Image: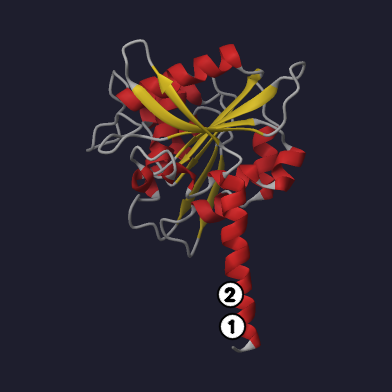
Amino acid sequence: MKLSTLLLVFLCIGSISNSFSQSSLFSYEKYISASGDTLNYRQLVSDYDPKTKYPLVIFLHGAGERGNDNEAQLKWGVLNFASSENMKMHPSIIIAPQCPKNMVWASFSEDNVSLQPSPTRPMKLVMELINEAIAKLPVDTDRIYITGLSMGGFGTYDAITRHPELFAAAVPVCGGGDVTKAPSIAHIPIWIFHGAQDATVNPVLSQNMVEALTKEGAHPGYTQYPTTGHFSWIAAYSDNMMMDWLYSQRK
């Protein structure tokens, strides 16, 4: 075997081993509502001191990770929060729920991304889960953050629009939201990411949100990767500047 091939094999094995190690840090959890609805989720508490309050990060996965295995939602993005460096610099509580198959996080009309009056069942359960986490875990309620990719990017906008008083910051990645609701969320620090070549979610949706928020006096961050398609979350969640920015936000 050539040295270059051998090195590649070792790198791949190391990457797989590291991902497995990081995913194992997330405990398997299940939230059951008063009505009996169930939401699977994975949870990481990167440090624990009962006298200390920690920021809470809610991570919403994309459409491809839906199901009931309580595994797939860790496939993209969220493991970046579980790196040794991030846990050292930003100890926090990470919750990654899994949306059931054939359901979605956000309740928008399909034609013009208009927010519908009632949330989807998964989003309703996510909000109940956040309230439970606040009650049972040492959560700093001034530092509750939400982020998501693709379907989860739409879900991020849905959540902050329905509960603008709750979140200290949001990072929607390759998603879209209701621009008419910009006045209600203009006070929330938001950093938006999208790929310019995204053929799955039109980057115009992110651009429209940036424009609408800016008109309301907000100062949203916007990073558009010029040669990236739909997988803009790979670069977004690898951005140390974004991580530092996110954890610096307080209500």
Query: Circle 2 sits in a helix, a strand or a loop, which is it?
Result: helix
Residue 171 on image: x %, y %: 53, 38
Residue 131 on image: x %, y %: 51, 15
136 left or right of 42 in image: right
101 left or right of 137 in image: left
Q: Disc 2 vs disc 1: Cβ atoms closer than 8 Å?
A: yes
Q: What residue lies at 42% left-to-right and 60% top-to-bottom?
A: 229
Residue 247 on image: x %, y %: 68, 33
Which image quarter: residue 145?
top right
Q: What residue lies at 30% left-to-right and 28% top-to-bottom?
A: 107
Q: Mark 2 = which residue?
A: 9
Residue 134 vs residue 2, the one in the foreground:
2
Q: What residue lies at 61% left-to-right and 40% top-to-bottom?
A: 25
| Amino acid type, mark 1 | Thr
Residue 207 on image: x %, y %: 44, 45
In which quadrant will I find the C terminus? top right
Q: What residue lies at 62% left-to-right and 70% top-to-bottom?
A: 11
In which quadrant will I find the N terminus? bottom right
Q: Mark 1 = which residue?
A: 5
Residue found at the very far bottom of the displayed protein? 2
| Amino acid type, mark 2 | Val
Few, some or many C-alpha atoms within 10 Å of disc 1 (few <14, some 14-19, many ≥20)?
few
Q: How does the figure colour the protein chain or chains? A: secondary structure
Residue 52 vs residue 140, the one in the foreground:
52
Which image quarter: residue 105?
top left
Report the number of numbered marks. 2
Label 2 – label 1 distance at C-alpha = 6 Å
193 left or right of 112 in image: right
